[in-house]
Structures are given as C-alpha cells and as structure tokens.
Amino acid sequence: AQAILDQYKRALDCPAESQEDDVENVDPDVPMPVSMLMMQIPTCVRSAQPGPSQAAAGPSSAPAEPAPAADTEPKITLGCKYSGGELKIKFRPSDPISKLLAAFMKHHPNSSSLPTDTSKYKVKFDGEVMGLNDPGTQWELEDGYTIDFVWKA
C-alpha cells in the first residue's frame, strides 16, 4: 500500500509538505481496509478528485481549457518544387508531411494525371527523403523553405 501511495505522490507531483504531512507510513505486510487506504491518499490527490456532492452538481464552472496548439498554430508557406514548376502551399509545421503531400496533389495544375497512391511519391527536404508520418517540426521547416516532390507514374 505504501508503494501505491508513493506512486500517486510522484505521478501527481504533490508538494513536499503534503507528501510528508498527510501520509502515514503503512506496513505493506498488514492488510488494510479500503476506507483506511483512502485516508492515506495525500490531500493534493484527494482535492483533485470531485467528492460526491461535486460530482452530482455536474461540471464545474472553471474556464474551458484552451484549444490544442495545432488549431492556433500559424501556417507557413512552403515552395513545393516539381519537374514542371513550383507551388506555394500553406502548411502547419506540426502537421504530418502526408498533409503537405495531399495539398500538393490537390493543387497541382495536372492533379488528375498524378498518381493517387502516395507510396509513389518522394518528398525531399535538403536532399533527404521525408517520412509521410513525420511532423514538419521534425524537419524544422520555416516559412519560405522549398520542398521537392518526385513521383513515379
């Protein structure tokens, strides 16, 4: 039981004073009723969980959490070079490269003649092949960079 309590404290980063003041040492070899175990949970853990009256009252009136960063992250403009020219495509660096490829395929002037199988494409940055599941942040892409698109028919 003490090991479980120690895990709770570490997982929740309880302040040091609550770790020491609220928890008594528990002999791991002595069985303990659940109600006593609950009393051993540090205050910082107990206060994070709604009590019966709070749960019945419904959701709290606390402000909603902000939207994920990807929704508010600004897009960058990348030059997308191919054998017949270049496209300018807006892209969120946290998105996977597959999204950039999808936008390229959609906006290419001859999109109807392009292969639809994404495995036929190579997306390159500075001569290195980018993985389609790689986020743009992995490649440290910035506004104005050029990406090369090569494909086999």
Image (cartoon, rainbow, N blue to C red):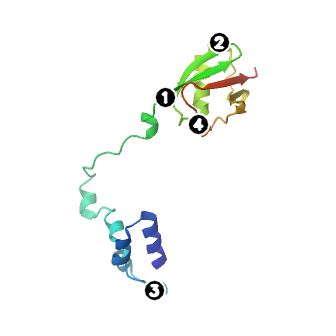
Spatial CA distance of label 1 from label 2 is: 25 Å
Spatial CA distance of label 2 from label 4 is: 29 Å
Question: In the rendered structure, which disc, 1 or 2, sits on the residue that comes first in sequence?
Answer: 1
Q: Name the residue under label 2.
A: 110
For disc 4, the neighbor class at 10 Å (few under 14, some 14 to 19, many from 20) is few
121, 113: nearer the viewer: 121
Question: In the rendered structure, which disc, 4 or 3, sits on the residue that comes first in sequence?
Answer: 3
Q: Is residue 63 above or below residue 148?
A: below
Q: Mark 4 points at which residue?
A: 140
Instruction: Give the amino acid at mark 2.
Output: Asn
Q: Is mark 2 on a helix, strand or loop?
A: loop
Q: What element carries label 3?
A: loop
Q: Do the residues labelled 1 and 2 touch (CB within 8 Å)?
A: no
Q: Which of the 4 quarters of the picture holds residue 122?
A: top right
Q: Percent from the top left, x then y, of residue 129?
A: 71, 33
Question: In the rendered structure, which disc, 2 or 4, sits on the residue that comes first in sequence?
Answer: 2
Of circles 4 and 1, the one toward us is 4
Q: Is mark 1 on a helix, strand or loop?
A: loop
Of circles 1 and 2, the one toward us is 1
Spatial CA distance of label 4 from label 3 is: 52 Å
Instruction: Give the amino acid at mark 3.
Output: Asp
Q: Name the residue under label 1.
A: 75
Spatial CA distance of label 2 from label 3 is: 73 Å
141, 134: nearer the viewer: 141
Instruction: Give the amino acid at mark 1.
Output: Lys
Quadrant into which the C terminus falls: top right
